[in-house]
Image: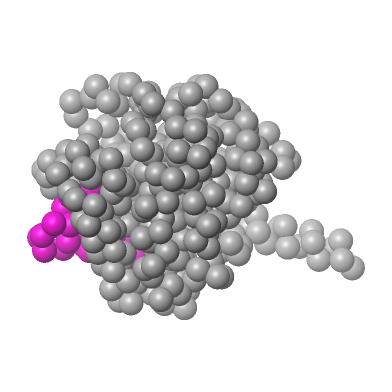
Amino acid sequence: MAKYRNHLPQLSDAFFITEGGVETTLMYAHSIELPYFAAFHVLKDEVGCELIRNYASSFCNVAQKHGIGFILESATWRANPDWMRKLGYSDQDVIDVNRKAIELLVDIRNKFETEKTQIVIDGCIGPRDDGYHPNVLMTIEEAQAYHATQIDIFSKTSADMVTALTLTYPEEAIGIVRAAKAVGMPVAISFTMEIDGKLPTGQTLKEAIELVDEATESTPIYYMANCVYPSHFQHALIPGGSWTARIHGIKGNASKKSHTELNNAKELDEGNPVEFGEDNRALLDKLTSLNIIGGCCGTNLRHIEEVCKTCINVFDQSKHNADSINNIDKS
């Protein structure tokens, strides 16, 4: 049974972190081949399951140490039907793998959750096509029908919510939101951007968020950005804009390189963890609702530790100042 599906704790004023880039960690730190960047592929045996347990547990320890919340994501970004078929999995495997991924997280939460460190189990959804350069764009109806398979599976597990990561165009996001709404699953939408701060299909983040909200009656619980370096879209964030208040999360890349450069890279670019922390902290000045920070490609424990060092006190102080202003207004 889902623990937080009807009262997600990250919708409060609490600070949450997520893990870093699980795929790049498996590939470069553990020398595991991941065809199609499919982290779920390691769940096929107990050795792989233990890798995921240890990986997620290390970030839970960081959250515990700092007394903050944690969004525990399933390794299912590629576990949707098309990608799984490319790897030889059956339709029944789609069900079994997604269920198994969530069950594994339940055990981790039971082990690490405390009163201060609430742990939300998040069913991770990825795009149907390439996450950097989509070749085929779906209609809203096609996206809803396609992603309903994975979302329906999650709705029958202990997943508290679903998050669609690395989306490249609004129509796919709208379809995902409608599929989630149909089965009562809270859904967060995360777009990726190029180094110019625009989606791969050319829209601005503002345009994408407003299109999705208009088409879904603002159904997403919040929006995020991922697989983009934190400073690459700061220029597009205008404080006070109602659309920016919808952004609660960022999962940035370690590298400042473009998507094309990352695709062609022969070695992992881990960037500068200290600078990564500082550049995420700078986003707190522009995004008043930002309370979820994690990592994407190339990030690891060092990056998330730096986020905690640089962002938690700033976040707490900004919330204290906001509360003080609200109290003055009420008096």
Quick one: quadrant of the N terminus?
Answer: bottom left
In the rendered image, residue 166 lying in the magenta stretch gets the answer no
Where does the magenta region start and end? 38-60
Please say if 249 is above or below 321.
above
Seen at 50% across and 40% down, the residue is 141
Confirm whether residue 285 shows in the render: no
| Residue 60 locus on image (x, y percent) | 34, 65
In the rendered image, residue 56 lying in the magenta stretch gets the answer yes
Seen at 28% across and 69% down, the residue is 103
Q: Nearer the viewer, residue 92 or 311?
A: 92
| Residue 206 locus on image (x, y percent) | 62, 33
Q: Nearer the viewer, residue 113 or 126?
A: 126
Q: Magenta stretch mostly in which secondary structure?
A: helix
Seen at 38% across and 61% down, the residue is 154
Please say if 16 is above or below 232.
below
Quick one: quadrant of the C terminus?
Answer: bottom right
Q: Quadrant of residue 283?
A: top right
| Residue 22 locus on image (x, y percent) | 27, 48
Confirm whether residue 269 shows in the render: yes
| Figure disc tally | 0
